[in-house]
Image: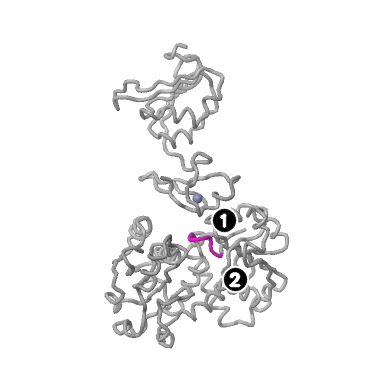
Amino acid sequence: MNIDSIKNGYVIDHIEAGKGMEIYELLNLNELDCQVAIITNAKSKKTGVKDIIKIDRNIDLDFDKLGFIDPGVTVNVVKDDKIIEKKKLSLPEKIVNVAKCKNPRCITSVERELDQIFILTDKEKNVYRCKYCEMSLK
Amino acid sequence: MKHLIDIKDLSVEEIDELIKVAKDIINHKKEYSHKCDDKTLATLFFEPSTRTRLSFEAAMLELGGRTLGFSEAASSSASKGESVSDTIRVVGCYSDIIAMRHPKEGAPLVASMKSTVPIINAGDGGHNHPTQTLTDLLTIDREKGRLDNLTIGLCGDLKFGRTVHSLITAMSRYKNIKLVLISPKELEIPEYVKKDIIEKNNMQYVETTDIEEYMGELDILYMTRVQKERFFNEEDYVRLKDYYILNREKLEKAKKDLSILHPLPRVNEISTDVDDDPRACYFKQALNGKYIRMALILKLLEIK
Ligand SMILES: [Zn+2]
C-alpha cells in the first residue's frame, strides 16, 4: 500500500502521538477488510510528533467517538484522490457506549444491558458525567 | 407526561406552584379529600425507608386514592433478577403513578425512560431525593414567608449528605442566599458542589468547623445525620457521628426566629431538650412532607 495516497476514504490527522492504536481499536478498524494504515510518531510542525490513520474506504465514521478520544484531530475526507473536506473535531455533547461508568453504586453496574451514556456537562474543563448517576468520568 | 427524578427537573415557577398548592391543601383539606378517588399510587421500595414510604401513602390516602407496593427488594421480583424497566412496565399496568426508591443511583431515571405512568424518585442511593428537597422548601417558605434573602447554616455531613447538596442546588436559584457550611474537615462539602453550584451561581458562603461561630446570623439551621452506611470503617463513623450535638446552650446566641430543620431520622445530633423550643421545626417538616407530596401527586396526574 502506498500510504501517501488513498482513493476514497479518510485521513485522520494530528492524532496525539500514542493515541493512534487506541483510536484504531475503539473505532473497530480491525474489522474492516479494506486497507488501513496507522502511522505513529510522524513529524508534525505543531506538536513535534503525531499519529495518523488512513482508511481506504468511505466507511461510516463515528465522529463523536473520535472527538471524545482526541478532540484535536482533523479528518480529511478523500474522494477520487482529492481532499474534499477537512473536518475539525470537537468534544461531542453525548457519548454512547464508549466509556463505562466506574461508580459501583450506579444502576449500570447491575443492569448491564443499559446503554452507557455520558453527557458533556462542562465544556471548559471537558467534564463528562454519567447520565444515570452523574459521576464524572476520570 | 412528567416525572420527578431530580429537583432540577422543576423550574422555580413549578416549585412556587407546588408550594402554593400545598398551602392551599393545608387550609382546605376537605376540598382535596376526593381528588384522587379512582387513582392508585404504587410505592416500589427496592430499599426500605418506612418514613418516606408512609409519607407517600398518607399523601395518596388523604387525596382519596389507593396505594399498593412493596417495601423491600426481598419481597419483590427484583430479588429474582428482574430489571427495573420490566418491573416498572408491569407495575404501570396496575397503577396511575409510581413512587420508587432504589439503592442504585440512576435507577428511577431508567424507570422513567420506559414507564407509561409518572415516576417520582423517592431516593436513589446517595444521589437524589427531590421530595425531601421540596419538603425542605415548603418548610422554609412556611416558616419564613420567603425563599430569598436568607442565611442558611448547613451542619453535619456535608460530604455525603445528598439532602444538603440538593437543598443548595435548589436555593442557588433564589436571590441573596448566604450559606454557612458547618462540618468536620473530613465531611466538608465536596469541591464539585462548591465549584459547580455555589461559586457558579455566585452564592455567598463561609466554611467553619464551629457550630456556634455564626449562630447569631442564621435564619435557618439545617442539621443532618452522619450516615453509617457511607463509611468504610467503623472507627471513622464512631469518631464523627457525635461531632455536633445541638442543644439549648448552643442556641443561646441564635436569633429568636431561627428555624431548625432536620430531614429525620435523627440520632444524637439534636438533643431532645431542643424539641420543645419554638424554633424546632423538624416535626412540622415531616408533616409538610405529606402536603408537598399531595401537591406533587396532583401535579403529575394533572388533576386541578
Ligand atoms: Zn453511572
Residue B97, placed above or below residue B272: above
Horizontal side of residue B75 vs A134, given as left or right: right
Q: Position of residue A116 (x, y in %)?
A: 53, 44
Q: Which mark is residue B107?
A: 1
Q: Chain of mark 2?
A: B
Q: Is residue A1 above or below residue B139?
A: above
Q: Quadrant of the C terminus of chain B?
A: bottom right
In this image, A91 relative to B288: left or right? left
Q: Residues within 10 Å of mark 2 (few under 14, many from 20)?
A: many
Along the viewing direction, whichever of B142 and B98 lies nearer the viewer: B98
- Residue B142 coordinates in the image, percent (x, y): 46, 79
Query: How far separated are the C-alphas under marks 2 and 1?
Result: 17 Å
**Residue tagged 2:** B53
Chain under numbered label 1: B
Query: Considering the numbered disc 1 on the image, is that residue within a helix, a strand or a loop?
Result: helix
Position of residue B25 relative to residue B303, above or below, is below
